[in-house]
Image: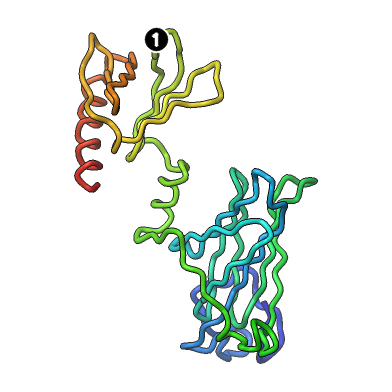
Amino acid sequence: MICPKCKKALPQNMNMNIRFCPLCGEELFAQGKSYIIEVQCVGQRESEDALMMVFVDDRQMYEVKAGESIYIALDAGFHSLKFRQKIRSKTISLPVNGDYVIRPYFNSLSGLIETNVQQVKISDAEHGGKGRAGIMITKPVMESTDGKKTFDVMLGDDDPEYEFNATSGFKEGVLRLFSERCEFSPEDKFKKEVLQYKEIVSVRRKMGSLDIECAGNVHKVYSIPKDIYNEVMAFLTNRISEVQEIQ
């Protein structure tokens, strides 16, 4: 970022909460002002990777389809934007002191998400001659009150509370217990079995195993180590009850 007053490049490791240039002391961002960020998703509409998620300051999540744009209003200052497409993601820090157009795209050569960031000024000639007044601000798909954790749970990126070897029938694998779900990953298969706590009817003891009953009288039975059996049973019983009370 370049200081708008002294025109010198600001330090790369500068505190993101600072509002004044450490070189000349002038204010970097006009207080009370907001700007428009246009995200133009680049890609093929018919591709299975056509949908990209955009996270703003780990507080809001937006979705944008390939070939389409969304418009986000941000207050002047430093902001963090993360772009995610399937398992790929890229995070950038954006010093917002004007309107921007960001074109995120998947680079098939590097296997990474790239972003083309350009500061612009939305003129009256755009958007039907109405300038910024002609733009419809996109509403977020999801908002988080506790930051990144909410999105990690939703996307399956959170860390498990418990992780141990287990057996389901003739399948051996790893059973992971999260705050909102449990996952069984067989050793010989890439696909994992996922059970959401809100969909579980009950958890019972069955000859040293976990008998998890789901809707439709579907049972998933897992044999787990004896030394953590009681602890796991207590965790699942209490956590399932807490999740279902929130619903």
- Residue 33 visible in rendering: yes
| Quadrant location of the N terminus in the rendered image | bottom right
> At 38% from the left edge and 59% from the top edge, which residue is drawn?
144
Between 146 and 124, the residue placed more toward the observer is: 124
| Left or right of residue 183: residue 237 | left
Three-letter amino acid code at disc 1?
A: Gly
What crowding class fits label 1: few (fewer than 14 Cα within 10 Å), some (14-19), or many (20 or more)?
few
Residue 137: image location, x then y, percent:
51, 74
Relative horizontal placement of residue 80, taking residue 46 as reference (left or right): left
Instruction: Tell me what residue is drawn at x 60 percent, y 52 percent.
Output: 51
Percent of width and height locating residue 217: 27, 21
Residue occupying the far right of the picture: 109
Is residue 58 shown left or right of residue 43? left
- Which residue is depicted at the point 71% across and 83% down? 8
Horizontal arrangement in the rendering, residue 239 relative to residue 188 (left or right): left
Instruction: Residue 40: give x, y in percent of width and height.
Output: 66, 65
Q: Position of residue 242 (x, y in %)?
A: 21, 42
Residue 224 in view in this figure: no
Residue drawn 42% across the image and 46% down it: 154
Q: Which residue is mark 1?
A: 169
